[in-house]
Amino acid sequence: MRKIFLLVASFAAGIAAFAQDDVQKAAAEAAAAIAEAPQVEAPQPKPVYWTKSLMTNLNFAQTKLWDWAAGGNDNYTMTGYIDANANYAKEKMIWNNRLQVDYGFLYSSDKPILQKVKDRIYFESKWGYETPIQHLSYSANFDFKTQIDNNYSYGTPTVANPTVSDWKAARTLKSGLFSPAYASLGLGLLWTPKPWFSLNVSPVTGGFVIVEDELLRKAYGMELHTKYADNADPSDYMYRTSRFELGAQIKADANFTINDNLKYSTQVVLFSNYLKNPQNVRVNWDNKVFWKMAKFFTMTFSTNLIYDDTILITNDSHPNGYRTVQFKEFFEIGFSYTISSKK
């Protein structure tokens, strides 16, 4: 019996050893097959060349008076702002596009008509290609600026109990859609020493000033048609619709992010017209402070400064117009929402 047991044990041990050899051999063959198999690379993320964003801002203010001894008028103000950006960057080339639209109106109980307080359309397109010099690029810069509808200065009707028609008749047209409009294309160099600062110098900048409304052409410096050039007392229709300008432009942009909620941006544009009075430089200077007070609520403070010696400012004291610095500022609190592409 003992011999039979030893024989069975020896047979089982042999089978186990044989099976172990087969398992090891199979494992070795599998490892060799895996090692020899072609390596599959992980898919690379698709490059993203465009970044896009859209910021919307809506502000509302209201004043209501009850038996207020100091006087005043009930009024309602609503303003809106859109800032859309679409920027492209690939290797040595950039192409940045920005559209800004401002609009707002006021209704006051002392004038039964809507009075516009803000109106601007401003589109910028900037193309750049790197030069061998660090931070310096060849550039082309296109600008277009106008407004949405008519803007007026508001006088007081001379009749008793004036109607809405009387109030409208007492106002004076100051500007309108394509009255004026400014379009320019400049070629030059773009310097970007810091991510938050850029300086565009365009020694060759051509553009048009357009004034569609003939009542406004003289005020915005339009020239007389040749056949009327010697007219001592020209009428509105005698002025040209557009004026071509060729000159040099310098544009400086700075965007500061103080923290996640507070931002400041500024832009200065200087233009000298080679064709007429190049020493009289046109100045546009815009500033904006943006403070995010809560998730969807913001405070905005903005200013716009213009000096253009071709524009005549008219009022009761200066019916023939005079040249001066134009300045506008807004302080607003309201609702804001931003949509941006993922990085």
Image: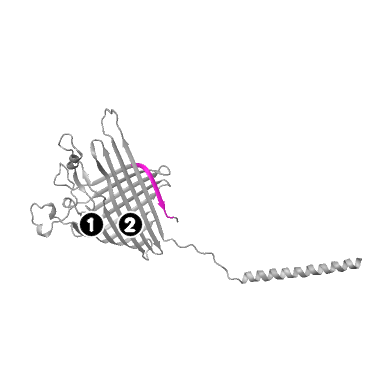
Where is mark 1, residue-wise?
Answer: 272
Give SS at disc 1: strand
Residue drawn at 69 percent across, 70 percent down: 28
Kindly state the secondary structure of the residue where label 2 is placed: strand
Which quadrant is home to the N terminus? bottom right
Q: Position of residue 188 (x, y in %)?
A: 30, 62
On residue 312, the disc is: none
Q: Nearer the viewer, residue 341 or 191?
A: 341
Principal secondary structure, stretch drawn in magenta: strand
| Location of residue 152 with respect to 210 vertically, above or below | above
Residue neighbourhood size for the residue with mark 2, other residues' Cα within 10 Å, grouped as few (<14), some (14–19), many (≥20): some
Residue 299 in which image quadrant? top left
Q: Which residue is mark 2?
A: 199
Residue 59 lies, with reference to residue 210, above or below; the image says above
Which percent across, then down, holds residue 129?
A: 36, 64
As displayed, is residue 22 above or below residue 313?
below
Cα separation between marks 1 and 2: 16 Å
**Which is nearer the eye, 61 or 323?**
61
Pick whichever of labels 1 and 2 is earlier in the sequence: 2
Q: Is residue 291 magenta?
A: no
Looking at the rendering, the stretch of residues picked out in magenta corresponds to 332-341
